[in-house]
Amino acid sequence: MSMAATTLADRAVIRLSGEDVRGFVQGLVTSDVTRELPVWAGLLSPQGKCLFDFFVWADGDDLLLDCEADAADDLIKRLTIYRLRRPIRIERDPSLAAHWSKEAGDTADPRLAELGYRWLGPVDEPASGWLAHRLRLGVCEGRAELGDLLWLECNAAELNGVSFSKGCFVGQENTARMNWRQKVNRRLVVVETDTPGPRTRVHYPELGLAVEHRRVDDLDGTLRPKWLAAALEPSASE
């Protein structure tokens, strides 16, 4: 697909190639990469806290990770640790960039269809409007927003970022326990504000928006897109 001004300039693409790349990634990340791609996934700490989030795409036998550019080198280092002696190459692919369009494309964002369309391709002009569009839909991403929070507190279950049927992944035990016990007591949310507060993780003054980490019984004044409102219904009835 060739369209102008669709490049997400703050993203990078990592290529994994070699022997049984899907098997390698499948044992590490939160989503099932043996099914149709792309998927949104996290690489967690053994305690189930977010280290990195990214999209996993297929390119023949290779896998491509569409990740935050500032985190790419750290993600490569982390994956290299897990690689051990496997004959797998893990490196940036500068020939590719992540692209986004609100209204036109072949592949809907796997987190939420309302986010628009996403694909990988050569770099073109930088897209505009993505950050505001994403935040208005209550969707958080990247290390600044997600930090080292528990993956389910990042709304990963609601945004198709975790599989509870795929088997083991790093941090799986705590993540599965939280899900079984329905103990997601805090969530990342987006609020309209001109002034950051004690719960603010990231403030975007140019947008009048902030990402905050709040208890589910303290969500007054937060944006409530349909997907989040539906997720909070069981908590509201407890």
Image (cartoon, grey):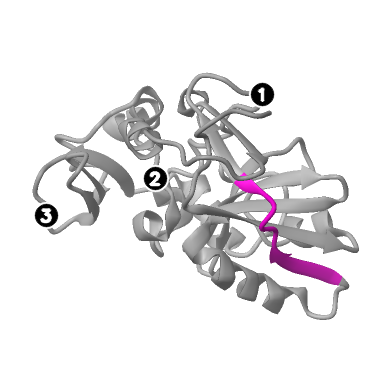
**Is 185 drawn above or below residue 104 in the view shown?**
below
Image height of 105 relative to 89, above or below: above
The location of residue 163, given as percent across then percent down, is: 64, 44
Say which residue label 1 marks: 106
In the image, farthest residue toward the left:
195
In this picture, which residue range is highlighted in magenta? 88-97
Q: Look at discs 2 and 1 and give the one toward the viewer.
A: 1
x and y, in percent, of residue 46 in the image: 56, 70
The reply to whether the C-beta atoms of the residues labelled 2 and 3 are less than 8 Å apart is no
- Mark 2–mark 1 Cα distance, whole angstroms, equals 23 Å
Q: Nearer the viewer, residue 153 or 180?
A: 153
Q: How crowded is mark 3: few (under 14 residues within 10 Å), some or many (20 or more)?
A: few
The residues tagged by marks 2 and 3 sit, at their Cα atoms, a distance apart of: 18 Å
| CA distance for labels 3 and 1 | 40 Å
For disc 2, the marked residue is: 140
Q: Which of 17 and 168 is in front in this view?
A: 17
- Mark 1: few/some/many CA within 10 Å (<14, 14-19, 20+): few
The residue tagged with tag 3: helix, strand or loop? loop
